Amino acid sequence: MIQSMTGYGKSVLQLPTKKVTIEIKSLNSKNLDLNVRIPSYYKEKELNVRKKLANTLVRGKVDFSIFVEMTADETSTTVNHGVVKQYIQQLRNVVQTGSSDDVAFLKMAITMPDALKTEREELDENEWSLINQHIDKALKEIVQYRVDEAASLEIDFKERITNIENYLEEVKALDADRIEHVKTRLKKAIDDLKVDTDENRFEQELIYYLEKLDINEEKVRLANHLDYFLQTLKTEDSNGKKLGFIVQEMGREINTTGSKANYAPMQKAVIQMKNELEQIKEQILNVL
């Protein structure tokens, strides 16, 4: 079962003094690109979070965030009274007008460095245990999103593989006419030269030339690649890189068939195969 690398998961935890929102977003990427944003008092758990994300999501550009909104009346940020008073006094000394506007000075002082102090909140293991459960919940949600997103991709892949198989059958049906067309064209070219030819030598050269244009191996290999692609889609693990390699091999056989065709109706079928394959290539970049 394939998975898309595009996904979104979210979980909200309401604690007695705060609301914790966990969000995970992912887009396609060649490798795992993790961006983790969490409050400073949870930083010691960041490595554990990264390992969990890497083990579950495997690949993609992943943005993970923990947002904390305080809901209690108390706050860990307080005014640093001594520092603010010193700022106000210094501002008065600078002005030296004999009258003072403490409100104006206070507005200025409160914006200065160290006017506010925040007491570092110690990590509560029980609280983190609850948050960790909600991280797992958000991960399950994004994985399900990826699976659902990939379901439509799988349908599209199967349809396009079927189309390529149909065009391959068309190529097989045209092959006999192609050979006759090549023989006729070469014979006509020799006749137009109006020179005497050794029929035996001509037949030998014709056989050699037709061997160079033979596409039987390409047809067999392409059919095998198409089957292998469908088999890989059915496996339990999502392996976008493997599917990408198979698509490359399919493209190689189609291109070789096109270069050997020398027959307009067959080349049209090859172009249609290339078009279907390009659509698969674009979508395969988003498969995990």
Image (cartoon, helix red, strand yellow):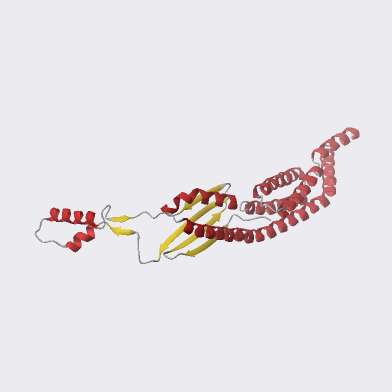
Q: Is 89 in front, or is 206? A: 89
Q: In this view, does 119 lie to the left or right of 241?
A: left
Q: Is 199 in front, or is 233? A: 233
Measured along the vertical axis of the image, is residue 252 above or below residue 288? Answer: above
Q: Which residue does the image show at 42% across and 53% down from the upper left?
A: 41
Residue 8 appearing in the image: no
Q: Which residue does the image show at 78% across and 47% down from the upper left?
A: 224
Q: In this view, does 172 lie to the left or right of 34?
A: right
Q: Is residue 43 left or right of residue 58?
A: left
Question: On the rendered image, what quadrant is the N terminus found in?
Answer: bottom right
Q: Position of residue 60 (x, y in %)?
A: 57, 51
Q: Is 224 in front, or is 175? A: 224
Q: Position of residue 139 (x, y in %)?
A: 57, 58
Query: Which quadrant of the structure image shows residue 145?
Result: bottom right
Q: Where is residue 166 in the image (x, y as percent from the top left)?
A: 78, 55
Q: Where is residue 70 in the image (x, y as percent from the top left)?
A: 40, 63
Q: Which residue does the image show at 47% across and 62% down from the upper left?
A: 21
